[in-house]
Amino acid sequence: MEELIGTQKPTHRILDPAQAIATLEGVVPGLVALRREESAVFGWEAVEVAIGTRLPSDFKALAEWYPAFELDDFLGVFVPRPGEERAWAGADDGPYSDYPADLRPPELVSTNLLSWGSSTEGDYFFWSVLGDDPDHWPVTICSRNGPWWHYEGGTVQFLAELVNSTLDPWALPPVDPEVTGWGGAGGGWQKKAEVSRETREV
């Protein structure tokens, strides 16, 4: 069984999704090339009914403005494509993680974990579904090296602070501020070292 090594808290918690996204765009300038000209329309209500809970506001806003993307050939952020929300949520139990209970820290054995990202090195990124307000769910990191930890800020703020080194990455490697892959409109995973406006397929 693994160990929960602690919790990090942001100095200032960003609750406004637009502000959180602007912060991430400032930290990862190449991300802006993928931004949609208009926000996409998602059937969030049907998805949330299907999985039995609302989703964090910053994550929904990120999906409305951006496709799935990868940072520094390392961290993949998996948002649904417009019109494919139900596929993202899954036909049965949705995006709930089936990470084995006997491999979790004791504190998280009975906690519902919702997946939103993973790394190329075997790290996993979840929300711990704790409480009725998804905007205050902690981000939970499962490191391939063993330690688990929480971040008490939103997903988007976590990404920004991981890239700009505001938070201590603990068992994660440093993440450079570059977009190295993204989901295309027709599906699949696009790869390019530097994202440009001309390559946008969202």
Image (tube, grey):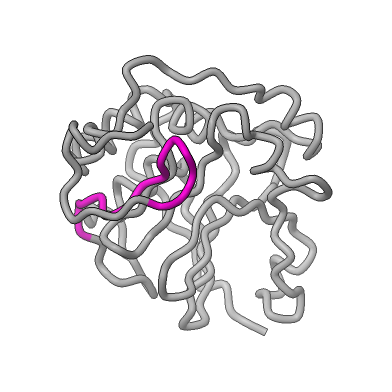
Q: Is residue 177 above or below residue 46?
A: below
For image coordinates 36% across by 47% down, the residue present is: 182
Q: Position of residue 27 (x, y in %)?
A: 20, 42
Q: Which residues are magenta?
A: 176-189
Furthest residue toward top: 38
Residue 98 placement, left or right of 41: right
Count of residue discs: 0
Q: Position of residue 189 (x, y in %)?
A: 41, 52
Res. 160 image quadrant: top left
Point out the image quarter for the C terminus.
top left
Residue 95 placement, left or right of 10: right
Q: Position of residue 24 (x, y in %)?
A: 28, 38
Res. 33 image quadrant: top left
Q: Is residue 181 above or below residue 57?
A: below
Point out the image quarter for the N terminus.
bottom right
Foreground: 47 or 166? 47
Residue 49 falls within the magenta-colored stretch = no
Residue 57 placement, left or right of 173: right
